[in-house]
Image (cartoon, grey):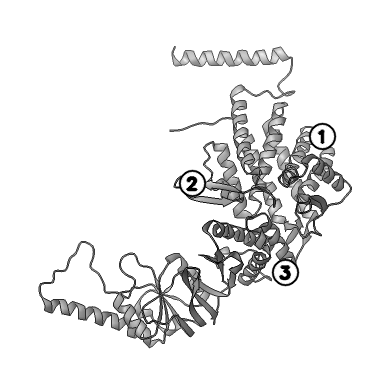
């Protein structure tokens, strides 16, 4: 069959099918939406794949959620219940599933918390959308109605939020505690929440700042001890230890230089060689090397520098044994192999400038601090610098843990707590936790749907019902009867008890604000916005085209 024949036959079949559809049903195209077979199958496939991802993380929602153990191909194990971490490490193939992984990543960047909530919510909205499509509604109409519902939900959330000031330390700590309560390290909330709050407040100016650069907060993880030994250091903690036999390990009234050049003999290029034929030449080379290093060290000593931080070098040794020997003799504390990416943070913290060459080694390039000392942390040693004379807006958190898995999870947990405080700096408002906002939205959106007509009313009611997945899952994970719990919650909210939520600890419904379970407004607003956006994108896909 030629190409033109096949095109004609396809067109004939399509027109015959269309005629059959209109004549047989006696309906015009605007009364009911009947999809062609392929777009319908593609849409269902996308929804099923995305819902599978949502169901995978659903059991880890809330304080009583279960943890996941993730094993990589090379045998490394991660234990976590952070939605973003689970999805990032999960191997997904279907393009729609990847959209949910990206959704979780977007929530992690925007709010830092609520990464499981946003995926569970998207799964529930897709479920509601698939039911609406199967009843004959057009996907574009559903997508538009969902967008309208998300706008109304944002408006409602803002109306029930409680404004706060950054000087209200209590509220900030309560928010951080709520974020930490669902983590593996929840028993250490009393210690980690105040550390997170103090760390953020030290790196911003609450009066003018409306964002937080989390790169100004450095988390140094050290194995050994317990999470109880974690501390906030106003100054700098360096992962490296001091070097040099006989060199000091503690310096008071320190003058610190951060150098980016090497204190070792220069080398030839890789393709060049130097041939030495007799002892005299050998002696001369050694003498020249010694003189070269001594010149550098005399220049360093001239500025009264007594602490030297040396950037890591890949071309040659950052510092030679001979240089270490001379510096130790002059009682200069040496720390080598400072990573290139840490240089801006160290310079900002210590108020010093990185020195790229010996010519620039002058007194005004140095930083000063009250104390630089090497301390033991578990089986390793670290360098701690405190009492910086001209500190930048930076802090370090020294995180301790008994094993690698706990340490990694504590790092992720404290990052979430820092992100929650960052949300409050961006949008200074709190709402109740414990699924109270979701059930309030469900009740209020159902009322709002009654004021509309046509397809929008139907779709917004479905959107409102889909929001009930959060309290349902929260109750299910806490071992409560989900149907009875959600029904009682709905009744309480229908009687204007806005702050009624699921008290997971006591296993009942109570005023969740009195239990100090609060979360930033931005977390919930961002979750609803991003979940709706992703659901709209998936709904509007009617074909998958593969390219080479």
x, y percentage for residue 258? 43, 75
Rendered image: mark on residue 436: none
SS under mark 3 = helix
| Between discs 1 and 3, the one toward the N terminus | 3
Residue 515 to residue 316: above or below:
above
Q: Secondary structure at mark 2?
A: loop
- The answer to whether residue 530 shows anywhere in this view is no
Specify whether residue 6 is in view: yes
Q: Which picture quadrant has residue 132?
A: top right
Residue 42 vs residue 196, the one in the foreground: 196
Residue 189's place in the image compared with 373, above or below, is above
Q: Residue furthest right?
A: 495
Disc 1 target residue: 453
Q: Is residue 300 left or right of residue 268?
A: right
Above or below 373: residue 170? above
Residue highlighted by disc 3: 169
Q: Which mark is residue 72?
A: 2
Of residues 158 and 420, the one nearer the viewer is: 420
Mark 1 crowdedness (10 Å alpha carbons): few <14, some 14-19, many ≥20? few
Name the mark nearer the viewer: 3 or 2.
2
**Image coords of residue 286 (percent x, y):** 20, 78
Position of residue 271 in the picture relative to residue 114 (left or right)? left
Alpha carbons under labels 1 and 3: distance apart: 46 Å
């Amino acid at each position: 069959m030629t190409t033109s024949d096949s095109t004609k036959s396809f067109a004939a079949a399509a027109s015959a099918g269309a005629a059959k559809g209109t004549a047989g049903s006696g309906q015009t195209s605007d009364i009911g939406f009947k999809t062609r077979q392929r777009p319908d199958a593609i849409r269902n496939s996308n929804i099923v794949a995305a819902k599978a991802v949502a169901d995978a993380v659903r059991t880890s929602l809330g304080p009583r959620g279960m943890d996941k153990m993730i094993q990589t191909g090379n045998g490394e194990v991660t234990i976590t219940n952070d939605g973003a971490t689970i999805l990032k490490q999960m191997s997904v193939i279907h393009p729609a599933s990847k959209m949910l992984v990206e959704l979780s990543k977007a929530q992690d960047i925007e709010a830092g918390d609520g990464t499981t909530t946003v995926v569970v919510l998207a799964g529930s909205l897709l479920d509601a959308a698939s039911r609406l499509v199967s009843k004959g509604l057009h996907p574009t109409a559903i997508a538009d109605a969902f967008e309208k519902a998300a706008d109304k939900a944002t408006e409602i959330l803002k109306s029930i939020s409680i404004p706060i000031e950054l000087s209200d330390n209590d509220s900030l700590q309560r928010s951080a505690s709520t974020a930490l309560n669902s983590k593996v390290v929840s028993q250490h909330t009393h210690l980690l929440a105040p550390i997170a709050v103090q760390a953020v407040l030290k790196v911003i100016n609450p009066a003018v700042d409306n964002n937080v650069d989390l790169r100004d907060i450095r988390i140094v993880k050290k194995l050994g001890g317990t999470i109880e030994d974690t501390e906030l250091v106003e100054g700098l903690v360096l992962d490296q230890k001091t070097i040099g036999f006989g060199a000091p390990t503690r310096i008071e009234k320190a003058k610190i230089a951060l150098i980016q050049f090497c204190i070792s003999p220069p080398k030839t290029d890789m393709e060049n060689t130097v041939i030495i034929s007799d002892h005299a030449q050998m002696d001369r080379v050694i003498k020249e090397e010694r003189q070269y290093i001594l010149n550098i060290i005399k220049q360093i000593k001239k500025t009264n520098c007594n602490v030297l931080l040396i950037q890591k070098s890949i071309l040659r040794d950052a510092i030679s044994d001979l240089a270490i020997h001379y510096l130790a003799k002059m009682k200069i504390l040496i720390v080598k192999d400072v990573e290139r990416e840490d240089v801006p943070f160290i310079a900002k913290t210590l108020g010093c400038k990185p020195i790229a060459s010996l010519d620039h080694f002058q007194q005004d390039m140095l930083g000063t601090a009250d104390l630089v000392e090497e301390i033991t942390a578990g089986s390793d040693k670290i360098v701690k610098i405190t009492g910086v004379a001209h500190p930048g807006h930076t802090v370090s958190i020294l995180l301790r843990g008994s094993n690698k898995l706990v340490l990694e999870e504590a790092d992720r947990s404290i990052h979430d707590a820092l992100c929650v405080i960052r949300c409050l700096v961006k949008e200074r408002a709190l709402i109740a936790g414990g699924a109270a906002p979701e059930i309030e939205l469900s009740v209020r959106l159902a009322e709002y749907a009654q004021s509309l007509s046509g397809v929008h009313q139907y779709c917004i009611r479905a959107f409102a019902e889909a929001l009930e997945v959060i309290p349902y899952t929260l109750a299910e994970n806490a071992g409560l009867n989900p149907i009875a719990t959600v029904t009682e919650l709905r009744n309480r909210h229908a009687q204007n008890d806005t702050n009624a939520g699921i008290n997971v600890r006591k296993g009942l419904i109570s005023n969740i604000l009195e239990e100090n379970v609060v979360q930033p407004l931005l977390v919930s607003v961002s979750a609803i916005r991003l979940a709706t956006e992703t659901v709209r994108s998936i709904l509007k896909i009617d074909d998958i085209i593969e390219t080479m």
